[in-house]
Image: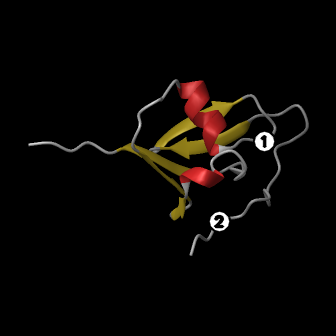
Amino acid sequence: MVAYSRVSTTAAEPGGAVKILLNHNPEEFPEESLTIRQILDRKGWTFPLIIARVDGALVERRDWETASVRDGAEVDLHHLVSGG
């Protein structure tokens, strides 16, 4: 089960920015609303194996285009690495 909100409960001010914690670092994006895909695009992250969590809840890859990231959210985007 995936537990996250598709609709932001805390909207950014009109003309304002979305402020989040991204991998424990404060980030600010100029958009009034934001998705996981938009964050990845803004950061230029194209790794093939990325895990996304918003406020501790896993966001599945198929939902990256539509899942809203609210102002003040804690977002974790981690690239999985394996090998020997």
Q: Where residue 64 sits in the image (x, y, percent)?
A: 63, 48
Q: Nearer the viewer, residue 82 or 78?
A: 82
Quarter of the figure with residue 82: top left
| Quarter of the figure that contains the N terminus | bottom right
Looking at the image, which residue is at 47% across and 29% down? Answer: 46
Query: How many numbered marks are there?
Result: 2
Q: SS at mark 2?
A: loop
Q: How is the image coloured?
A: secondary structure
Looking at the image, which residue is at 54% across and 38% down? Answer: 26
Q: SS at mark 1?
A: loop
On screen, residue 84 versus residue 24, left or right, reads: left
Q: Residues within 10 Å of mark 1 (few under 14, many from 20)?
A: some
Q: Residues within 10 Å of mark 2 (few under 14, many from 20)?
A: some
Toward the left, the furthest residue is 84
Q: Where residue 32 sits in the image (x, y, percent)?
A: 81, 38
Marks 2 and 1, Cα distance to the nearest angstrom?
A: 15 Å
Which residue position is annotated with label 1?
A: 33
The amino acid pointed to by label 1 is Ser
Toward the bottom, the furthest residue is 1
Looking at the image, which residue is at 54% across and 27% down? Answer: 43
Q: Where residue 41 sits in the image (x, y, percent)?
A: 59, 28
Q: Where residue 27 sits in the image (x, y, percent)?
A: 58, 35
Look at the image and tell me whether residue 10 can be seen. Answer: yes
Look at the image and tell me whether residue 73 can be seen. Answer: no
Vertical placement of residue 64 versus 56, above or below:
above
Sequence-first tag of 2 and 1: 2
The amino acid pointed to by label 2 is Tyr
Q: Nearer the viewer, residue 24 or 33?
A: 33
Which residue position is annotated with label 2?
A: 4
| Quarter of the figure that contains the C terminus | top left
